[in-house]
């Protein structure tokens, strides 16, 4: 996982829960099929318009609800570069780090507009808005997780811990 | 400084004499719980790449509940995968077609005070009602737990929720937890544990305590704990657990991040309105909203005491014309008990349909999902857009009594008038 991510912004509101990101009724399908329904309850064209590297910017409590990692899987399938939100639900935040999907909290995401080009520095906890020529403070990665993120998430971290190459 | 229940359990699980909120610990996991939809099917790839050897198979419990009974070939295949995986790894604890995993692991004695239970389902926190530190994790994190038997956890701060006083007729644990979630907000306890205490909590049966701990995650909480007492020992005895059970309590001088007091006697039935669980109103404010379906079941409110209350309201009556009432007992054991007590007959004669125990329509998986524009009143735990089927549908949440009264009238109804003496 890279520590610098740059991409175009898609804006969403508060409480984008896991039933919106990954609706339960499609969870037994393949990831490709599930990804066609990602976010459809609030944005039916999401799966068509989103491009690799795009960044989701949202309000409070992103990823609330289920522990389903299919939420990360469909977003990774669309090659979402990162998610910036005012706050994240706990399990979603943890799962994202485990699978190498960058997540950053900042105090007020409302100043970022849809279509803005932003750049995130995960280690410095910094967000640069190239469109608005502004810089915002985000949260840094928790220290105990830096090593895990550096090597690409929990699976490679475990491989190292267990001595599996 | 004293410790909370959460701190005590995590101190023990990480081999330390004391920990405090904010500490990062490596905790030994007592039960690794997976269900079919987020279990072996998703876990096995990474698990195999990392050697594929279980750290301790006796600590792994797998319950197939989301795809049961399968409604599609894909679900049947996931179920088959899960069953084969359990067999291949020679698991001692694999259950299927028995009901939602949280109820099944409680009934089979896997949940005990002081245990650390991690499951690939957000409502794993239900086990906190019996005094376990239990929380939901993702499938990737489960790979680590299966391989190493441990994971890192941040010791959470604890919010103390105190309910004193006596619940009025027609008001239940579901109403208490909905009111609590309303006040905390759906993210109000994020990264924190909730400890429910007070005389009104002590007086609740285990069935009802599990409602509170089940829904702690709907306020964003990591765990929902209730101090275990004699009722827990009695409950476990009935499930065949007779080992010495350590009753863990928070110390007098334990530190809480905040404390909220409630008087149960002032509470009226509560309803969570679309599309968030903290969009809660007293039932009087939403009475009369027409419904197409009512759903009595789920790991939140499909237990025997719930079915008894609903049967009391429905006995000898008929549900409203033109609506469906689905009853889904939370386990095979409950189904069987309800059958012995004649409850299933009462439901059937009232015009309800009794489904087999499973996660069912609660998560939009199998029997009973709703269509565009349809409205459901449910005793389950989540009312997110699209949760029970169509994203164009609407889900209201209430107690089993409120659900049963709503079934009779076809519109959201305060259950009190069907419970007061002399009305029956």
Image (cartoon, grey):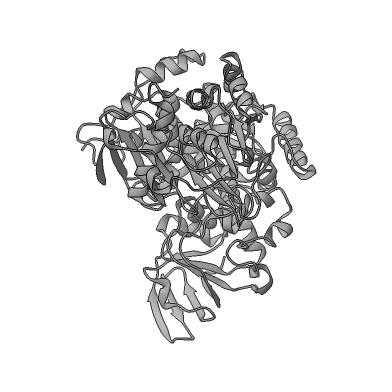
* Residue B373 x %, y %: 61, 55
Instruction: Identify the residue at horizontal 63%, vertical 24% (top origin).
Output: B349
Compared across the picture, whether A150 is left or right of B12 comes to: right
Indicate whether A71 appears above or below B311: below
Residue B316 appears in the picture as rendered: yes
Residue found at the far right of this picture? B73
* Residue B70 x %, y %: 74, 38
Which quadrant holds residue B14?
A: top left
Compared across the picture, whether B39 is left or right of B285 comes to: right
Compared across the picture, whether A122 is left or right of B98 comes to: left
Residue B359 appears in the picture as rendered: no
* Residue B104 x %, y %: 57, 27
* Residue B5 x %, y %: 33, 33
Quarter the N terminus of chain B occupies: top left
Q: Nearer the viewer, residue B104 or B385?
A: B385
Q: Nearer the viewer, residue A49 or B40?
A: A49
Q: Nearer the viewer, residue B209 or B269?
A: B269
């Amino acid at each position: 996982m890279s520590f610098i991510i740059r991409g175009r912004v898609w804006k969403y509101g508060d409480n984008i829960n896991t039933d919106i990101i990954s609706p339960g009724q499609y969870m037994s399908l393949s990831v490709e099929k599930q990804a066609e329904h990602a976010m459809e309850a609030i944005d039916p064209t999401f799966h068509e318009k989103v491009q690799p590297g795009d960044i989701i910017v949202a309000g409070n409590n992103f990823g609330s609800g289920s522990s389903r990692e299919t939420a990360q899987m469909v977003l990774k399938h669309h090659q979402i570069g990162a998610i910036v939100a005012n706050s994240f639900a706990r399990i979603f935040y943890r799962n994202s780090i485990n699978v190498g999907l960058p997540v950053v909290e900042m105090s007020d995401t409302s100043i970022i507009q849809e279509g803005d080009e932003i750049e995130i520095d995960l280690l410095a906890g910094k967000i640069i808005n190239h469109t608005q020529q502004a810089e915002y403070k985000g949260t840094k990665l928790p220290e105990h997780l830096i090593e895990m993120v550096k090597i690409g998430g929990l699976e490679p971290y475990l491989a190292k811990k267990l001595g599996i190459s | 400084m004293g410790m909370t229940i959460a701190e005590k359990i995590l101190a023990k699980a990480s081999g330390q004499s004391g920990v405090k909120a904010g500490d990062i610990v490596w905790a030994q996991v007592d039960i690794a719980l997976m269900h079919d939809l987020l279990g072996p099917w998703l876990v096995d790839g990474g698990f195999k790449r990392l050697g594929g050897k279980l750290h301790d198979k006796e600590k792994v419990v797998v319950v197939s509940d989301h795809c049961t009974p399968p409604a599609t070939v894909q679900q049947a295949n996931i179920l088959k995968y899960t069953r084969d995986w359990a067999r291949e790894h020679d698991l001692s604890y694999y259950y299927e077609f028995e009901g939602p995993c949280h109820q099944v692991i409680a009934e089979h004695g896997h949940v005990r005070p002081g245990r650390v239970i991690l499951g690939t389902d957000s409502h794993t926190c239900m086990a906190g009602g019996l005094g376990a530190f239990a929380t939901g994790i993702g499938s990737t994190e489960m790979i680590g737990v299966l391989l190493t038997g441990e994971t890192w956890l941040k010791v959470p701060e604890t919010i103390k929720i105190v309910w004193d006083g006596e619940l009025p007729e027609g008001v239940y644990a579901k109403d208490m937890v909905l009111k609590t979630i309303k006040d905390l907000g759906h993210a109000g306890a994020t990264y924190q544990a909730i400890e429910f205490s007070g005389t009104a909590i002590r007086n609740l049966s285990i069935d009802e305590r599990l409602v509170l701990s089940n829904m702690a995650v709907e306020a964003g909480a990591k765990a929902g704990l209730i101090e275990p007492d004699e009722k827990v020992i009695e409950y476990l005895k009935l499930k065949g657990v007779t080992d010495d059970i350590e009753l863990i309590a928070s110390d007098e001088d334990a530190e809480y991040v905040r404390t909220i007091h409630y008087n149960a006697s002032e509470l009226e039935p509560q309803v969570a309105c679309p599309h968030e669980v903290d969009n809660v109103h007293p039932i009087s404010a939403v009475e009369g909203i027409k419904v197409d379906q009512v759903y009595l079941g789920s790991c939140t409110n499909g237990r025997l005491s719930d079915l008894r209350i609903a049967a009391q309201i429905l006995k000898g009556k008929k549900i409203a014309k033109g609506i469906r009432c689905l009853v889904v007992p939370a386990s095979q054991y409950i189904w069987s008990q309800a059958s012995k007590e004649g409850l299933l007959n009462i439901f059937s004669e009232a015009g309800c349909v009794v489904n087999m125990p499973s996660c069912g329509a609660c998560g939009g998986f199998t029997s009973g999902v709703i269509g565009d524009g349809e409205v459901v009143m449910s005793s389950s735990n989540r009312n997110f857009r699209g949760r029970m089927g169509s994203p164009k549908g609407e889900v209201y949440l209430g107690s089993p009594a409120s659900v049963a009264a709503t079934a009779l009238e076809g519109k959201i109804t305060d259950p009190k008038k069907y419970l007061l003496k002399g009305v029956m």
